């Protein structure tokens, strides 16, 4: 596969990743992102993790890496309160003009950052949609239905509305974030939809997705599928309602 060209950026980037109990992969993830992305970013860029009270050694590995790399920061939470809450706090932690948000489980390819970065300066939000998604069938099925629902309600062309691979202007994120109250567990979906409805400029690009090497997905447990699906449906209705004249 042809390597993605590195794009010179003019403004620093805050790379944000929530993490919890990823000791098997986190060192490799950090090293991949530093090698393929961080070392090519403008001065002042940062690499920020929020650790959600990991108990498997993840926190200690991140402390070690932070001591080695001055651009790496670790925000340590005393308790775990979910992906969306961690994401919201990370957005407020960002110190740079651009935010890049992604997962810490190693399923995304770091070099694909440059696929979205090439559009920085042209758009407010560059959204990386997964192709060849390597997740359990239930997650793939639920995602497909949810994406069709968002298309039905909003007419938006996004194939992966809850994707955790996106480059955004920090000013846009901080503008929209206080209004993201309708989808407590799907913050990134609501952020994307509100950006669309508020006429921010958005570009969708396609990014690769890898099989998870260790552990299991920390997405929606099967036992909560029905209740969370209903909450997501109501959330979409409430977002749409909030923009009616």
Image (cartoon, rainbow, N blue to C red):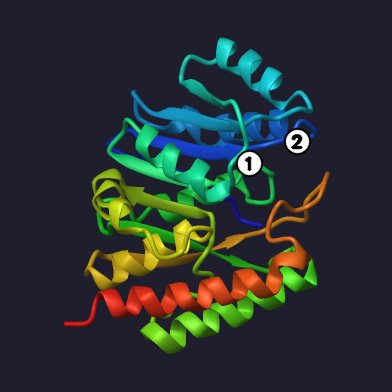
Query: What crowding class fits label 2: few (fewer than 14 Cα within 10 Å), some (14-19), or many (20 or more)?
Result: some
Residue at position x 40%, y 35% in the image: 14
Q: Is residue 182 above or below residue 17?
A: below
Viewer-nearest residue: 56 or 151:
56
Is residue 78 visible to us here?
yes
Tell me the residue that label 2 is attached to.
Answer: 25
Viewer-nearest residue: 186 or 104:
186
Residue at position x 73%, y 36% in the image: 22
Q: Position of residue 29 (x, y in %)?
A: 66, 36
Viewer-nearest residue: 155 or 100:
155
Q: Position of residue 167 (x, y in %)?
A: 40, 50
Tag on residue 90?
A: none
Q: Are marks 1 and 2 in contact (CB under 8 Å)?
A: yes
Tell me the residue that label 1 is attached to.
Answer: 104
Residue at position x 76%, y 23% in the image: 57
Q: Is residue 94 left or right of residue 81?
A: left
What is the quadrant of residue 124 in the picture?
bottom left
Residue at position x 54%, y 71% in the image: 231
Query: What crowding class fits label 1: few (fewer than 14 Cα within 10 Å), some (14-19), or many (20 or more)?
Result: some
Is residue 7 visible to us here?
no
Viewer-nearest residue: 31 or 168:
168
What is the quadrant of residue 204 in the picture?
bottom left
> Where the C terminus falls, by quadrant?
bottom left
First in residue order: circle 1 vs circle 2:
2
Q: Is residue 190 above or below residue 171?
A: below
Distance CA(mark 1)–CA(mark 2): 8 Å
Q: Report the residue that reaches farthest toward the top.
A: 67
**Element type at mark 2:** loop
């Amino acid at each position: 596969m042809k390597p993605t060209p590195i794009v010179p950026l003019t403004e620093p980037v805050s790379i944000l990743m929530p993490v919890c109990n990823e000791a098997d992969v986190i060192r490799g993830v950090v090293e991949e992102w530093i090698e393929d992305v961080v070392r090519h970013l403008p001065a002042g860029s940062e690499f920020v993790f929020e650790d959600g009270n990991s108990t498997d050694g993840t926190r200690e590995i991140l402390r070690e890496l932070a001591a080695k790399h001055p651009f790496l920061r670790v925000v340590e939470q005393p308790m775990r309160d979910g992906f969306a809450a961690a994401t919201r706090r990370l957005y407020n932690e960002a110190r740079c003009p651009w935010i890049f948000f992604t997962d810490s489980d190693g399923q995304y390819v770091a070099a694909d950052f440059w696929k979205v970065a090439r559009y920085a300066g042209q758009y407010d939000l560059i959204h990386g949609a997964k192709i060849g998604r390597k997740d359990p069938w239930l997650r793939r099925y639920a995602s497909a239905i949810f994406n069709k629902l968002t298309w039905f309600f909003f007419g938006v062309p996004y194939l992966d509305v809850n994707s955790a691979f996106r480059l955004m202007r920090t000013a846009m994120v901080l503008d929209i974030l206080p209004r993201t109250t309708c989808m407590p567990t799907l913050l990134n979906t609501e952020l994307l939809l509100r950006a669309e409805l508020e006429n921010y400029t958005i570009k969708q690009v396609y990014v690769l997705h890898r099989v998870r090497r260790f552990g299991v997905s920390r997405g929606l447990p099967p036992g909560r599928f029905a209740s969370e699906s209903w909450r997501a449906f109501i959330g979409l209705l409430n977002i749409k309602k909030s923009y009616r004249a």
